[in-house]
Amino acid sequence: MVTDSASGQPLPGVGVQLIGRPDGASTDALGSFRVSRLPAGSHTVRVTALGYRIRTLTVTLAAGETKTVDLPVVASALELAEVTVAQPRDLNQSVAAISGIDRQLRPVNSAQDLLRLVPGLFIAQHAGGGKAEQIFLRGFDVDHGTDFAVSVDGMPVNMVSHAHGQGYADFHFAIPETIEQLRVYKGPYTARFGDFATAGAGEFTTKTSLGQSQAKLEVGRFDTRRALLMVDLTGAGGHLLSQRRRESAYVAAEYFFTNAYFESPQHLNRFNGLAKYTGQLSERTTLAVSGWHFHSRWDASGQIPERAVREGLISRFGSIDDTEGGRTGRSSANAQLTVDLPAGAVLTQQLYYSRYHFNLYSNFTFFSADPVNGDQIRQNEARHLAGYRGTYERDLALGRRTLRSVLGVGSRVDDVDLALRRSVRRQVTDTIVSGRVQEQNLHAWLDETLPLTEQLTLNAAVRADYFRFRFREDRAPLLSGRGRQVRVSPKLNAYYQLTPAVQLFVRSGLGFHSNDARAVVSDSAQALPRALGYEVGSNFKPWPALVVNVAAWALHLDDELVYVGDEGVVESAGRTRRFGLDVALRYQLSAVWFADVDLNFNHGRLVGAPRGEDYIPLAPSFTSIGGITFKRPNGLSGSLRYRRIANRPANEDNSVRARGYFVTDLLASYTRRRYQVGVSIENLLNVNWNEAQFDTRSRLAGEAEDVSELHFTPGTPFFAKLNASIFF
């Protein structure tokens, strides 16, 4: 077991290696690990955790003997010289070292900031802060999640056949201070991820226990207020409560309000609650149970046309229809049971359930369809989501090598009542489509990892998914129907440890994203468009204080899906191909100063379209995130950060361009044992920038015909926020 030496708090996700051997492990939720099938003799265990001193321990084993060791580690200042680029257990997480450093260095102020921890990922908000963010990654406009899978504690966040877009991933229910770990997987190379994991996947894990309780208040411009309370229910981060077992429990609650920077107040209210218990039921059995509740309501100004600002009809922060907005909520229960079986096998079983509702009023085209009453629509749904996932993991000796096998099975069921209706100032006038979606996904995967030599490791896997779709339209039975499809997705990855400071990798795999059930059963659209991805890259340290990740990649997609919200349909953009280069650097300038930069070059085109008309709308061609951070031993820390995205096509012929931006943020805090104070400033230089942008046909009141041009949501102006915390 690995613990913090000061608090006794267990440390999950810590890497454990045996020096001179390929054997390794990582700690589970209670800080426990197991290494099996070792020969008799002396073995040196090496524990590495960011922010802690490296710990080694020599253990001598007799033939057939089992030993239990406790490994408390001492907290220390972050030293990139101690970061290793070798990844003995989770090889497919190729940016593990980078993500671990970012979690230590990059400040997190909101659930949106958690998504920004994914190297190369950009987000945009265009509905007053209450709707899921628009995501950009690896040359994709992912919309709200069509090509990036998100999970929290193993629960899927993406919603299939959602009222507002396929793969819709609203991450606002996560409380930032409760997140312990982020694992990032780029590309379709990992077998345990299925639907939506084409550009990549992000796994967020909440804390097993709290080192201490916390009360926090935040106050900022535009009537912004936030209150947080996290209470440790077991004391001292889960110390032994008896001689038989270790357990921890805590509750966390968050309230957030802002009117935002628009002329029409946004009245954004959000409440989040989390309760989590983790206990060691026996020496070999661990149970984790959590419950979540989230509710949000808001008003929005929507996207506005450039001509309205240019002609002086409204300001940059004005609106054409200020009755947009909505409300949403999610209540979830999650339980995971982990059992260490004989012969070093591990069986993990998980059950989860979510009750979800969504109600959104939008007006994209203003007075195009209805010159008198306007074109406002209402998208709403009520959803039950339930699922199961089980994995069996075992190491098998093959001569002098150890074959690591993971077998997984799972099922997910979504039962959704959804509708698209016309409305006037939030009063429903007509129903466009309404009905019930029932969708099930059964899946299984097998993942095998074998060290062929001391340096070369091969990972081969295959995943099989079965989808069953059903849609029953309330008023038009002809639009109802059923569908089903099977998708098999093989993966093949190789990793070569050239030196202790240089790891090379070649990765490849097939993946997919699912289509909306309504399109599958009524339009005979592709149910599970396939994605083929491959890349070559390296994690290396040219010198001790510099960590680098480089990957040259390509991704071919059978069908690019575009959700047309005001019509409630999914359109096919056809086949696409993308390739690019990702570069991430983390450098320690001195004992207290750190620098980081992500550079992402992407090139994407529609396949089969005429040259010059083959641009992928809103696909980013260049993005970059970076900054300078300092962390002093006396508790003073700060960071100056930037975000840069280049101009990019907003339509297929590149006649309309979405404007790029360069925005800087500043954050500083002072932390002591019993309190913390801090300040955050967004858009430090107060530049005018467009956050979300679309090429849209619309008509304003008094116009004779539609006009196609760039519509945008303005980005945050200078915004300052103060925060203060008490630890107890």
Image (tube, rainbow, N blue to C red):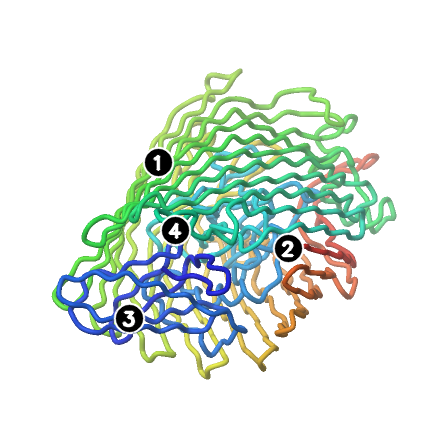
Disc 3 is placed on an element classified as strand
Q: Earlier in the sequence, mark 4 or mark 1?
A: 1
**What amino acid is found at the position of numbered circle 1 in the picture?**
Ser
Residue occupying image coordinates x 47% and y 70%: 74
The answer to whether residue 629 is seen in the rendering is yes
Locate residue 71, reporting x and y percent.
Answer: 37, 65
Q: Earlier in the sequence, mark 2 or mark 4?
A: 4
List the residue tagged with mark 4: 531
Residue 241 located left or right of residue 411: right
Q: Earlier in the sequence, mark 3 or mark 1?
A: 3
Locate residue 139, reporting x and y percent.
Answer: 52, 58
List the residue tagged with mark 3: 18
List the residue tagged with mark 2: 727
Between label 4 and label 1, give the one nearer the viewer.
Answer: 1
Q: Nearer the viewer, residue 215 or 82?
A: 215
Residue 448 located left or right of residue 257: left
Distance from label 4 to label 1 (Cα)? 22 Å
**What amino acid is found at the position of numbered circle 4 in the picture?**
Ala
Disc 1 is placed on an element classified as strand
Q: Quadrant of the N terminus?
A: bottom left
Residue occupying image coordinates x 58% and y 42%: 173
List the residue tagged with mark 1: 411
**What amino acid is found at the position of numbered circle 3 in the picture?**
Leu
Are the two marked residues, 1 and 2, in contact with CB atoms closer than 8 angstroms?
Answer: no
Between label 2 and label 4, give the one nearer the viewer.
Answer: 2
Are the two marked residues, 4 and 1, in contact with CB atoms closer than 8 angstroms?
Answer: no
Disc 2 is placed on an element classified as strand
Disc 3 crowd rating (10 Å Cα; few below 14, some 14-19, many 20+) is some
Disc 4 crowd rating (10 Å Cα; few below 14, some 14-19, many 20+) is many
Distance from label 2 to label 3 (Cα)? 37 Å
Locate residue 647, reporting x and y percent.
Answer: 64, 62
